[in-house]
């Protein structure tokens, strides 16, 4: 395997998932970390034994970095990724890829110009239950897709948004429950059901009025080219973090994913699969897919093959979210 020198930009809660995954790969070395918060930088330097920086541009000028992991607030994803790509680095970005389709298009173009790999973290695609659904779809045993139901009901109160000035703002978060919390499950809906042709949606701010600029709740209806349909309800206004729900109806089976996977085939047979991706702790809903995704990303680099969640693939959900926001703003059905 090739050896890779790595750096992590953004030392918030998610960055240790990336650090641990890098440390677990024998041919990867964490050379540097970067954050504007000097205390966070020094804590990581002491703990990890790597170099530390408060400016990512200085880091990339002074360190010979092969791969940059970007774990910063949303509004920094595009400019940082483009800068790193233009400086000869492969880039792995936390979700969302960018805040809108303009940003994602610029990131894709930068990756194409650089010849480097741009990957995005949608780690739930690596959950065994989700992989089982994808395999069944690819094998053709489920038949034609007919309908989907996507539900995310989580709990985010004012104190959550007070943790960072960028949270809950259009300019720096790019939206609310849609682009931050529910994006993973909406991405799974797109990956498993396909791209809808249009959407009609509404957004609201029920619980967090006065605390955030953006939506805490969204719901809507998808149309697909072959007559299939989908509904979704997404909220941060619930009192707890309930397991996400994804129901998929095909000609030959109905699949329900809520923690575990249940499949009811039209011939009366059933299948059940436990979800092995969930972990305990306050952030347990993240699952353990980061390690699997990051391992696959480096395997793709090593074998010189495309990473499956590249720029064009990850940009699909941003295109859908853009259409949802436009529909909510205008009251119209919006083509995707």
Image (tube, rainbow, N blue to C red):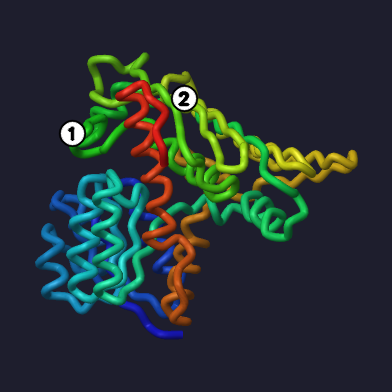
Q: Quadrant of residue 313?
A: bottom left
Q: Quadrant of residue 44?
A: bottom left
Q: Quadrant of residue 75?
A: top left
Q: Which mark is residue 27?
A: none
Which residue was labeled with disc 1? Answer: 165
CA gap between label 2 and label 1 equals 26 Å
Rendered position, 327 above or below 336? above
Q: Earlier in the sequence, mark 2 or mark 1?
A: 1
Rendered position, 305 above or below 271? below
Is residue 131 among what the camera can see? yes
- The foreground one among 45 and 224 is 224
Rendered position, 157 above or below 60? above
- The foreground one among 149 and 335 is 335
Residue 303 horizontal side relative to residue 179, left or right: right
Q: Residues within 10 Å of mark 2 (few under 14, many from 20)?
A: some
The single residue placed furthest to the right in the displayed view is 268
Is residue 47 among what the camera can see? no
- x and y percentages locating residue 263 in the rendered image: 76, 42
Q: Quadrant of the C terminus?
A: top left
Which residue was labeled with disc 2? Answer: 219
- x and y percentages locating residue 139 in the rendered image: 73, 60
Tell me the residue at 47%/56% (across/down).
290
The single residue placed furthest to the bottom in the displayed view is 1
Number of numbered discs visible in the structure rendering:
2
Tell me the residue at 35%/47% (across/down).
96
């Amino acid at each position: 395997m090739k050896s890779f020198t790595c750096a992590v930009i953004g030392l918030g809660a998610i960055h240790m998932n990336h650090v641990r995954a890098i440390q677990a790969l024998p041919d990867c070395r964490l050379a540097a970390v970067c954050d504007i918060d000097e205390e966070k930088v020094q804590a990581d330097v002491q703990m990890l034994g790597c170099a530390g920086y408060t400016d990512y541009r200085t880091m990339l000028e002074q360190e010979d970095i092969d791969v940059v992991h970007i774990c910063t607030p949303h509004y920094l994803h595009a400019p940082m990724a483009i800068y790193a790509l233009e400086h000869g680095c492969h880039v792995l970005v936390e979700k969302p890829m960018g805040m809108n389709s303009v940003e994602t298009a610029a990131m894709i173009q930068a990756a194409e110009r650089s010849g480097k790999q741009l990957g995005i973290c949608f780690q739930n695609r690596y959950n065994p239950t989700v992989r089982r659904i994808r395999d069944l779809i690819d094998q053709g045993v489920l038949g034609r897709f007919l309908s989907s139901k996507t539900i995310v009901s989580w709990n985010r109160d004012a104190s959550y948004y007070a943790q960072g000035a960028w949270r809950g703002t259009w300019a720096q978060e790019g939206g609310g429950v849609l682009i931050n919390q529910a994006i993973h499950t909406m991405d799974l809906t797109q990956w498993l059901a396909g791209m809808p042709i249009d959407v009609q949606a509404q957004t609201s701010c029920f619980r967090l009025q006065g605390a955030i600029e953006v939506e805490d709740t969204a719901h809507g209806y998808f149309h697909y080219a072959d007559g299939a349909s989908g509904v979704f309800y997404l909220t941060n206004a619930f009192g707890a973090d309930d397991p996400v729900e994804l129901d998929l109806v095909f000609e030959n089976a109905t699949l329900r994913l809520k923690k575990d996977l249940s499949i009811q085939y039209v011939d009366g047979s059933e299948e059940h699969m436990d979800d092995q991706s969930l972990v305990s702790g306050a952030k347990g809903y993240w699952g353990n897919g980061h390690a699997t995704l990051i391992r696959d990303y480096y395997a793709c680099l090593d074998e010189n093959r495309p990473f499956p969640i590249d720029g064009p693939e990850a940009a699909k959900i941003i295109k859908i979210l853009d259409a949802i926001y436009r529909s909510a703003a205008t009251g119209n059905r919006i083509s995707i």
